Amino acid sequence: MSEKKVPFQWTEKVDKEGKEQLKLGILTGGGDCAGLNAFIYTIVVEYQGEVYGIKDGWQGFLTKQIYPLKFSDVENIFHLGGTCLGTSRTKPSLEKIKRTLIEKSIDGLIVIGGNDTLSLLQGLVKLGIKVIGIPKTIDNDVESTDLCLGFQTAVEIGTKAVKDIKTSAKSHNRIIVVEVMGRSHGTLANQIGIGSNTPLVLIPEEPKSLDWILSQVQKMDSGVVIIAEGFKLDGKEIRESKERDAYGNVMLGGVAKVLVNYLKTKTKKEIRSTEITYQLRGAEPIAQDMILAVNFARHTLKLIEKNTWNRKVVMKNGKVRDVNVNGKI
């Protein structure tokens, strides 16, 4: 049996013009989502130099779990959900990150994350670290981009789930309150509502009183109410626990249950609650997210080829472009 040929990128550290390539580091931080592996795959396979994976997001700088990525590490991940690098909500000191990059001889850093993960980039730039940021979150709320990795898959999966829940609700003459992710932005909930033809969608940006919600539910024989986890019930944020993550965020969750308990005291209708959460993150990416991941990765490689750093790759008005890490053009 003949030995499998490995792409030339693994034996050559120079480009077609003989120019030495920089050693890259790559990490994924915050919540996982669809499209991360497709992005990682494209960077590793198409870059002509060395790429080092940083394990579990920023936490990898504390554990120093940083290792070279080979073709064998990524050859089967393109279509998979989640992230082969692991992820976490960790926030090490900027000096710790800088020292580790120098120790590992990493020349430039690609950071895939949401608002919290990407918030460290400006500080790293001030320390002289070369960075490129990639927006990803199913909330689709990163500044300066119309689309984040993972959002389109989350909408697709969420829409299918709500449609199925509506079928069950109708069969049992029930009203089911469905909680989805969305800390401060209701874009995900809104899009799932449109896709599933669900008129009653409760989002953080549009406060509604409990009396108003009750009046809408009273009009329903059966069906679904979609509620984002960050929606406040009469101004009160519903928290899963009192703990905060490394960025100061509280753990939200349970708003659907609390709303249902209230509605049960005001109406004789049969009302239940359910959550669509982690399946929106961990789902296998749909084609649109894989395409976006490849386009983001190739734009990143073009920036690196031109030695253009300290940029955030975004989708704006249907085109992939880049802005400063602070969000400005």
Image (cartoon, rainbow, N blue to C red):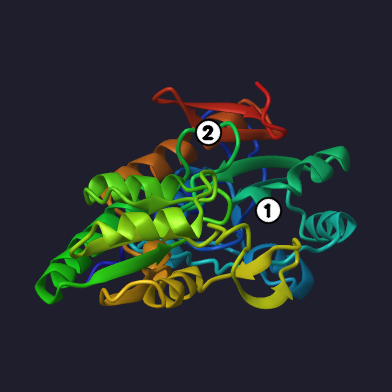
Which quadrant, please, contains the C terminus? top right
Does residue 186 appear left or right of residue 94 in this picture? Answer: left
Q: Where is residue 170 in the image (x, y as percent from the top left)?
A: 13, 68
Mark 2: secondary structure: loop
The residue carrying pointer 1 sits among few (fewer than 14), some (14 to 19) or many (20 or more) residues within 10 Å by Cα, namely some
- Residue at the location (70% across, 63% down)? 249
Q: Is residue 121 above or below residue 236?
A: above
Which quadrant, please, contains the N terminus? bottom left
Does residue 102 appear left or right of residue 26 in this picture? Answer: right
In the foreground, 92 or 201: 201
The amino acid marked with disc number 2 is: Thr
Q: Where is residue 101 in the image (x, y as percent from the top left)?
A: 78, 56
- Residue at the location (13% across, 66% down)? 167
What distance separates the C-alpha of mark 1 from that of mark 2? 15 Å
Q: Can residue 254 be seen in this view?
A: yes
Identify the residue position indicated by label 2 in the image.
145
- Residue at the location (81% across, 63% down)? 92
Q: Where is residue 323 in the image (x, y as percent from the top left)?
A: 63, 27
Identify the residue position indicated by label 1 in the image.
116
In the foreground, 301 or 311: 311
Mark 1: secondary structure: helix
Quadrant in which residue 95 is drawn? bottom right
Q: In this view, does 92 lie above or below 193?
A: below
The residue carrying pointer 2 sits among few (fewer than 14), some (14 to 19) or many (20 or more) residues within 10 Å by Cα, namely many
Q: Where is residue 165 in the image (x, y as percent from the top left)?
A: 21, 68
In the foreground, 259 or 117: 259
Count the numbered circles shown: 2
**Label drawn at residue 149:** none
**Of the residues under marks 1 and 2, which one precedes in the sequence?**
1
